[in-house]
Amino acid sequence: METNNHIWRFATIGGVKRVNLDSGADLLALETLDQKLWTALSCPVNGLEIDPQTLQLIDTNNDQKIRVPEILAAVKWVLNLLKNPDDLLAGSSYLYLDAINTETIEGKEIYASAKTILNNLGKRDQDYIAIEDTLDIVKIFAGTSFNGDGIITTDSTRRNELQQLIEEICLTVGSKQDRGGKYGIDLELLQTFFEACENYYSWQIEAQEKASEIMPFGIDTPNAHQAYLAVKSKIDDFFLRCNLAAFDPETTNILNQLNARVADIANEDLNFKMDEMRNYPLAKIEAGKALNLKVGINPIWQNELKQFSQILFGSNQETLTETAWHALKVTFTGYEQWRNKETGNEVATLGMFRIKEILHSNYRAELAQLMIEDSALNKEAESIMLVNKLAHYNRDLFTLLRNFVSFNDFYLPGKKAIFQSGTLFIDQRSCDLCLKVNDMDRHNALVSFSGMFLIYCKCVSKSTSEEMIIVAALTNGDIDNLIVGRNALFYDRSGQDWDATIIKIIDNPISIRQAFFTPYRKISNFISTQVNNFAIAQDNKEQLEANNKIIKATENAKESAEKPTAPATPFDIGKFVGIFAAISLALGALGGALASLIGGFMALIWWKIPLAILGIILLISGPSMLIAYLKLRKRNLAPLLDANGWAINARATVNIKFGNLLTQIASMPIDAELNLNDPFSKKRVKPWKLALFILLTISIISYLIFKYGLKVIQFI
């Protein structure tokens, strides 16, 4: 279809002209749409209310970001496989087989693969394939001998010999799981196994060819060497001590070190001193002494030495000279060098006979041929995987476009965008504009530009104890009861409830009404704070003065006992004349200013007085309301999305009218019955009586002010 002359339709949504995606023709022409007109240029793969597998399939470079080129590639691919592009707009979880375009080679392969899937699942007569059908890859390939992944299992052959060898390879060098969920081997494991067999076989053959050098004790050489190693260090220590005693006979007692060390543990249970006694000399140290293998041995070492003697010398050998000991060490040199070259020991459990049988058979070539046959079906198997991809795109791609190219789902009443994670209930309201926070540091840097009143909440799932942080935008109501630490309830898009606690608040205007009372609220808070501070300060001052008076009174009592009482100082009114004058001057100035203000006010014509009062109110609340109005018109969601990893290309304005939809205030049901008779409330005056009283009071006060007010103030 020719798309260069495609006529696009736009609508003003959220203060921005956004493109309408209403038909398959729009999708076919999407690559011709100027990217400057896209609402987003990239979005994260994680944290969105859309199937993450779909996003992973679109993210072809696996960088956890979806960008415009990847979106265009996905759209082009899926539309090439559908007969009717309009089918994509339905977002159906079912992919009907007759909707697949079989005029292309890839379409034919995917159609055939879809039929294969249904056959393998026992749904041969079904004319559609659901996403659930494509998800169970294990079940899809469970009934096939080959599945194109290059991994063969015991089901890949009927020969018992090959099945046995596959199991042996899995047990010795490892296994891999194939697409059908079964464990088998691939070419890499096959090569590893046969290399191990060849290495182990060559290593064992070397021992047979050099038996006299490597196996001095025949087949008992490994046991003899093990017994030799068990006492080697201790016998070396014994002969070294004897040589030192020969070098200096006076050191003999020191080298034995037995008397003092045994004395330290003589009064204790020796069963708990085995490790300490193991460090004692093997036998009594004497210059030039041979080691007696049967008598005078450290009891902790008797068993090891006995086993060593019987295996290497037989039961008739009683002593071991140092010369014989060194000769024995040389005897094991060839064996130890051979052991150090050990290789292929992972297959040692199979035994030389089985390894020789495997190496002299044609099993390796037969298994490799099975792997070649399996890999030959790789293209068909990949087509089966592409059915899963097509089914996901058929359901989710258009939803992503409506939240990427344009923000239609966000601004359309009754729908939610993929970045809206749920609903927060707090202070008799529900907040629908809630986003998961992926990076708190980025939010701290960007949220001030949103112009919205935001509350950050730590949420804990009641069912799984999972934790996350969300940010909710309050766009309606007031803020009197919102403080850090207050609890709320959050419902995610699946309906699961989370305990939420406010951890941070970003203060911005919510409504014009709230902005009207903001100056008075600030003045009230300021006065309340100052009064509290003054009261606390006065209380502390009085407490301090009381303490000082008590201390001073105690000191004066002591002094009065020693000195005669002085006469009291008479009251001197002259000292207070200046104070009285200053107070009178201040009151006069205040009264004069007040008289001038009220005088000017009273000089107005009666109908101008309400206008003057209205002017005063506007003077106080007007700036706050104007600033709030300007901010409310410019509330922008884009900084929040940018903080979550999006690249937003246009404003996402949340104006006053739209904000009222995003935050719902509690209201009585339409058909609800309300009983106004509250037994615990104070008795109220009837409304008409209260109105009459207020009217009379205002009339009397106005008359008195008009007639006497100015004279009274001037008199003061």
Image (cartoon, rainbow, N blue to C red):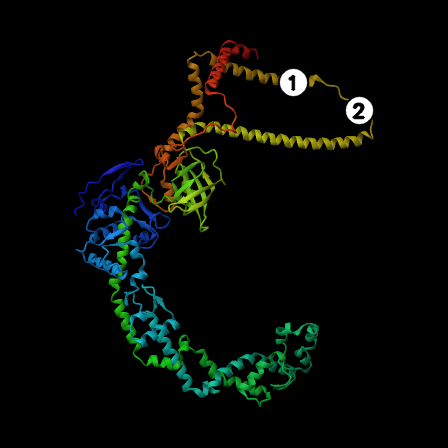
Kindly tell me whether residue 86 is visible in this rendering: yes
Please rate how many residues cluster around mark 2, counting C-alpha atoms within 10 Å: few if below 14, some from 14 to 19, many from 20.
few
Q: Is residue 556 above or below residue 708?
A: below
Looking at the rendered structure, the kind of residue marked 2 is Ala
Q: Which residue is mark 2?
A: 566
Q: Nearer the viewer, residue 102 or 256?
A: 102
Is any atom of residue 235 visible in this view?
Answer: no
- Judge depth for marks 2 and 1 and give the one in front: 2
Circles 2 and 1: CB atoms closer than 8 Å: no
Foreground of the two, 5 or 333 = 5
Picture residue at 32% right of the left edge, 47% below the top: 42
The quadrant in which residue 609 appears is top left
The local secondary structure at tag 1 comes to: helix
Determine whether, in the image, residue 671 is placed left or right of residue 248.
left
Above or below, 501 against 566 in this view is below
Marks 2 and 1, how far apart in space? 28 Å
Quadrant position of residue 25: top left
Residue 72, image x and y in percent? 25, 49
SS assignment at label 2: loop
**Nearer to the camera, 164 or 225:** 164
Tell me which numbered mark, 2 or 1, is placed earlier along the sequence. Answer: 2
Compared to residue 307, the image places residue 414 above or below, namely above
Marking on residue 578: 1
Indicate whether 409 appears above or below 204: above
Q: On the rendered structure, is 457 left or right of 39?
A: right
Q: Residues within 10 Å of mark 1 (few under 14, many from 20)?
A: few
